[in-house]
């Protein structure tokens, strides 16, 4: 199973992708987590990514695509994967298509977690305090939401036109949202 999670910052993609990964036994690949781990470890990739992340901007496509291309070659991703936070731009969609085409595979489902933006802002401000994330201050958060609506929201229509999109309300109880997603990917 090859699944993509979409939805604005704070929709619960990370939480749900981790739960689904456990349920399906395939890896949860979060580009945001990989970037954050690289920032923490002070790697060259982390140094490249940090200023963009701190400003709420996207890391350039070339850097992000190369990172995902490498991650998808790992053994654990061969039976399938859940991509969380990728693709986020039209160019990334094209790159992902090319990566899968060369493997003879394809995306099975794109799950969009839908949420009310005001609820999301509250959630993220709370998470920022809990996790000490430097990219969730109110200004950066507003920029992240704006970048999402400009660059990533158009992907929803694109995947809808390919008949891959499943919309799930992200605001329910966590277990109920997971159950709805499991039902959707199995049907
Ligand atoms: P996330 O945890 O998915 O919200 O990602 C945190 C930050 O990492 C984003 O605000 C971007 O700066 C960067 N990032 C994560 N995924 C991508 C991506 N697919 N393309 C570009 N930047 C990304």
Image (tube, rainbow, N blue to C red):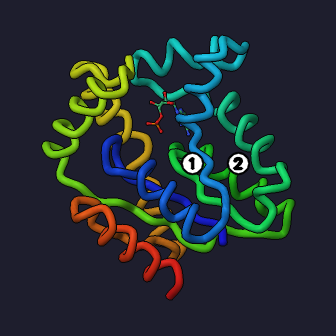
What residue appears at the point 65 percent right and 22 percent down from the top-left corner? 38
Q: Nearer the viewer, mark 1 or mark 2?
A: 1
> For mark 1, what is the residue?
87
Is 66 located above or below residue 21 in the figure? above
**CB atoms of marks 1 and 2 within 8 Å:** yes
> Along the horizontal axis of the image, is 91 left or right of 45?
left
Mark 1 CB within 8 Å of ligand 1? yes
Distance from disc 1 to disc 2, alpha carbons, whole Å, reads 9 Å
What residue appears at the point 53 percent right and 50 percent down from the top-left corner? 84
Residue 123, image x and y in percent?
Answer: 22, 39
> Along the horizontal axis of the image, is 140 left or right of 84?
left
Is 177 located above or below residue 82 in the figure? below
* Residue closest to the far bottom: 187
> Helix, strand, or loop for circle 1?
loop
Label 2: how many Cα within 10 Å (few below 14, some 14–19, many 20+):
some
Identify the mark nearer the N-term, 1 or 2: 1
């Amino acid at each position: 199973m090859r699944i993509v999670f979409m939805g604005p910052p704070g929709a619960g993609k990370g939480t749900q992708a981790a739960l689904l990964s456990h349920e399906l036994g395939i890896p949860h690949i979060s580009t945001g987590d990989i970037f954050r781990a690289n920032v923490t470890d002070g790697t060259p990739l982390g140094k490249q990514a940090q200023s963009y992340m701190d400003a709420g901007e996207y890391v350039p496509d070339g850097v992000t695509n190369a990172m995902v291309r490498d991650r998808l070659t790992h053994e654990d991703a061969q039976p399938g994967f859940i991509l969380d936070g990728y693709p986020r731009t039209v160019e990334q969609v094209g790159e992902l298509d090319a990566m899968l085409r060369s493997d003879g595979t394809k995306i099975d489902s794109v799950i969009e977690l839908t949420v009310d933006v005001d609820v999301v802002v509250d959630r993220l401000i709370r998470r920022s305090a809990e996790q000490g994330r430097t990219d969730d201050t109110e200004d950066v958060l507003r920029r992240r939401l704006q970048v999402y609506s400009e660059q990533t929201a158009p992907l929803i229509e694109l995947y809808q036109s390919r008949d891959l999109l499943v919309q799930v309300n992200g605001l329910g109880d966590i277990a109920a949202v997971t159950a709805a997603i499991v039902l959707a990917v199995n049907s």
